[in-house]
């Protein structure tokens, strides 16, 4: 018995495209993917269709309704065992869906549209510039996963659909499924892809290279545009030594270069400043006072690109007697490898 011989209740209740191909794709997705993925895929079509109506688009005239359904119901087939190849899940899914449609005799022109809809469904700014089926599929998927345009849905539609196809904590369950695939096959999660961005949250800090890490090892010797020609602190410990050197020389630009643009700074208790503009003024006053500062390292803790540094600070020349205090700073390594202060209190 084929899938067309037995009516599927969901088809009648949600008025899904009632064609043999649609039912076959529905049955394939239901069999191949876990419920949270399958329910999400069907809901995505229902929401995409609602967006089409709101935009005044008519099935059969302005867009191919069956093709929109196929694109939505198969858009996460890359998270199935069938679709778990060596590419990012969106592309694996597009290839798997294309093979399924080809086996059903679908013409290549329509297969190409479904491929685009599936491969590009996580690519904001690209899917929306393609044909109506590709754009509507992404809109429906975005509504179901992130609530994009949910306020524009007809009243009660989401409740009715969720009663039939519960969410099952979709957002987190889907994220976990992508990460599980990527963790076992790192080639599926290039750092510059959506799976790569998800995987980065589940790896030790620094294990997944950033864009700037990739630039640093490109081999072309590129430097940040407008980067200062002055030397940079190559270790967290050097920041304190360079601060003392620049203060001694009255080099305000050197001092400011040791801070991130939005750094937090407190030279004295209660005087909390944010940003290099305010920090510049405070440090210039320190230079003008003739004060000198000695920093003696007490402790340092570093985890990848972040360091926590504690110093014993002795301030002289600003008053009748030296002032001894303990300072704490958070430092961060920059894309060019130099260390600067994020917090200095």
Image (cartoon, helix red, strand yellow):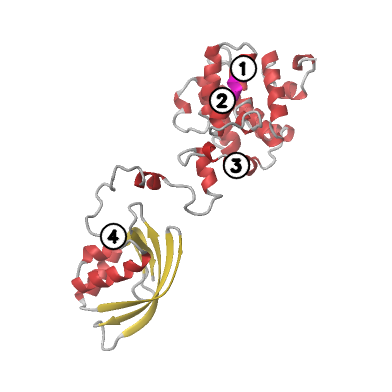
Give the quadrant of residue 158. top right
| Residue that numbered label 3 is attached to | 184
Q: Residues within 10 Å of mark 3 (few under 14, many from 20)?
A: few
Reading the chain from its start, which is encountered first: label 3 or label 2?
2
Q: Nearer the viewer, residue 94 or 41?
A: 94
Circle 4: element type: loop
Calculate the distance from the C-alpha at mark 3 to the C-alpha at mark 2: 20 Å
**Tag on residue 101?**
1
Circle 2: element type: helix
Q: Main secondary structure of the magenta part?
A: helix
* CB-based contact (under 8 Å), mark 2 and mark 1: no
Instruction: Return the x and y of residue 265 as percentages of the image width and height.
Output: 36, 67
Q: Magenta stretch containing residue 96, yes or no?
A: yes
The nearer-to-camera label among 3 and 2 is: 3
Reading the chain from its start, which is encountered first: label 3 or label 4?
3
| Residue that numbered label 4 is attached to | 232
Instruction: Return the x and y of residue 123 as percentages of the image width and height.
Output: 48, 32
The nearer-to-camera label among 1 and 3 is: 3
Q: For the magenta stretch, what is the residue range?
A: 94-100
Q: Magenta stretch containing residue 264, yes or no?
A: no
């Amino acid at each position: 018995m084929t899938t067309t011989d037995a009516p599927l209740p969901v088809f009648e209740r949600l008025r899904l495209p009632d064609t043999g191909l649609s039912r076959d794709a529905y049955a394939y997705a239901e069999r191949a993917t876990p419920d949270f993925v399958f329910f999400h895929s069907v809901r995505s079509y229902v929401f995409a269709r609602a967006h089409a109506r709101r935009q005044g688009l008519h099935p059969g005239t302005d867009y191919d309704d069956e093709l929109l359904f196929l694109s939505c119901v198969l858009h996460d087939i890359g998270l199935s065992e069938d679709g778990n190849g060596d590419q990012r899940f969106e592309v694996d899914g597009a290839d798997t869906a294309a093979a399924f449609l080809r086996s059903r005799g679908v013409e290549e022109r329509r297969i190409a549209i479904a491929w685009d809809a599936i491969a590009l469904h996580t690519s904001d700014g690209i899917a929306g510039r393609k044909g109506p089926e590709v754009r509507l599929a992404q809109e429906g998927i975005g509504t179901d996963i992130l609530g994009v345009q949910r306020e524009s849905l007809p009243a009660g539609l989401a409740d009715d659909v969720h009663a039939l196809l519960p969410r099952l904590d979709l957002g987190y369950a889907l994220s976990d499924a992508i990460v599980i695939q990527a963790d076992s096959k790192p080639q599926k999660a290039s750092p510059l892809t959506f799976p790569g961005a998800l995987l980065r949250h589940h790896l030790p800090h620094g294990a997944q290279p950033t864009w700037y890490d990739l630039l640093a090892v490109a081999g072309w010797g590129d430097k940040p545009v407008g980067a200062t020609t002055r030397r940079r602190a190559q270790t967290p410990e050097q920041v304190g030594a360079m601060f003392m050197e620049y203060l001694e020389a009255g080099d305000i630009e050197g001092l400011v270069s040791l801070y991130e643009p939005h750094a937090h700074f407190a030279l004295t208790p209660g005087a909390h400043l944010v940003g290099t503009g305010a920090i510049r003024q405070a440090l210039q006053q320190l230079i003008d006072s003739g004060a000198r500062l000695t920093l003696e390292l007490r402790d340092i803790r570093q985890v990848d690109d972040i360091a926590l540094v504690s110093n014993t600070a002795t301030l002289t020349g600003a008053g009748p007697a030296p002032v001894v205090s303990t300072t704490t700073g958070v430092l961060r390594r920059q894309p060019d490898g130099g260390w600067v202060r994020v917090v200095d209190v």
